[in-house]
Amino acid sequence: MNNKFDALKDDDSGDHDQDNCSPKDGEKEKNDEEEKDSNTTKRKAVVPGAGEHPLQYNYTFWYSRRTPGRPASTQSYEQNIKQIGSFASVEQFWRFYSHMIRPDDLTGHSDFHLFKEGIKPMWEDDANKSGGKWIIRLRKGLASRCWENLILAMLGEQFMVGEEICGAVVSVRFQEDIISIWNKTASDQATTARIRDTLRRVLNLPPNTIMEYKTHTDSIKAWEDFHGLVNASGGR
């Protein structure tokens, strides 16, 4: 699988430094189809095209952006996540990725999410609720390289943990950027350790890099506690 990416990267990835289009450009390609299917219970699954290199799983790109300081809720968060599109092959991935702005060029409070098809990038999703994520905080200027290395490793099945991987997120913030990889079973310490070691290798992280594992249960509790305090104080 890794060889398929190596063979296609130079020819199909496009000139990353020259891509200044909005993340929603990729979304436009799917808008008509998404609107037609919005009232149906099943969407037509994406499949590899003739002669394309299939991935082990189908994946979906998502994008979200919000104004810091604005009160948030689970419902508003879900409404704010925009689906860019799904893909089933290496070639289909590059078709989306080569037209997306790079994380280092995003502004404000923005996130890209890449999750297996059918899994929403939310703590409460059935595939995520018993899991957690490895978190790495990056100084500004490193997000684009680390994000690309992370998602190529994920799509190329380099983590070798079966179906444990759910997806990955890059979060662009004002002072720093954050990347994370989500897995299904937070209690499986052997698996989380293997993900950590693979993450350190594929990102070529210095030995002193701080890596934090956080369960989604803890994330939900922290979020509820914070918003409970905010509401109690009458603040926003």
Image (cartoon, rainbow, N blue to C red):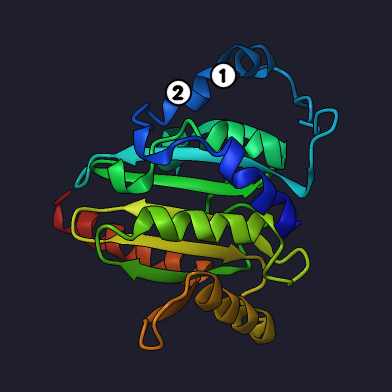
Q: Residue at the spot x=17%, y=48% of the render?
A: 236
Q: Which residue is under mark 2?
A: 25
The type of residue carrying mark 2 is Asp
Q: Position of residue 22 (x, y in %)?
A: 37, 28
Q: Are marks 2 and 1 in contact (CB under 8 Å)?
A: yes
Determine whether, in the image, residue 208 is placed left or right of residue 149.
Answer: left
Q: Residue at x 57, y 82 (%)?
A: 197
Q: Is residue 231 above or below residue 109?
A: below
What x and y, as percent, mark residue 166? 64, 58
> Which residue extends farthest right?
50
Q: Is residue 156 visible?
A: yes
Residue 146 shown left or right of residue 116 in the figure: left
Q: Which mark is residue 163?
A: none
Asked whether 85 or 225 is in front, the reply is: 85
Position of residue 186 measured from the top left corner of the image (x, y, whole percent): 61, 75
- Quarter of the image with the N terminus is bottom right
Residue at x 67% of width, y 34% of height: 92
Residue placed most toward the observer, 75 or 30: 30
Residue 50 vs residue 145: left or right? right
Crowd rating for badge 2 (residues with CA inside 10 Å; few <14, some 14–19, many 20+): some
Write the residue at 61% across / 79% down.
192
Q: In the figure, residue 136 lies in which quadrant?
A: bottom left
As drawn, 85 above or below 212: above
Query: How far is the residue under mark 2 from the one under mark 1?
Result: 7 Å
Q: Report which residue position mark 1 lands on.
A: 29
- How many dots with numbers? 2
| SS at mark 1 in the image | helix
Q: Amino acid at mark 1?
A: Glu
Place of residue 74 in the rendered image (x, y in percent of width and height, measured from the top left): 44, 46
Question: Which secondary structure lies at badge 2?
Answer: helix
Nearest to the observer: residue 151 or residue 110 = 151
The part of the image, by quadrant, that contains residue 31 is top right
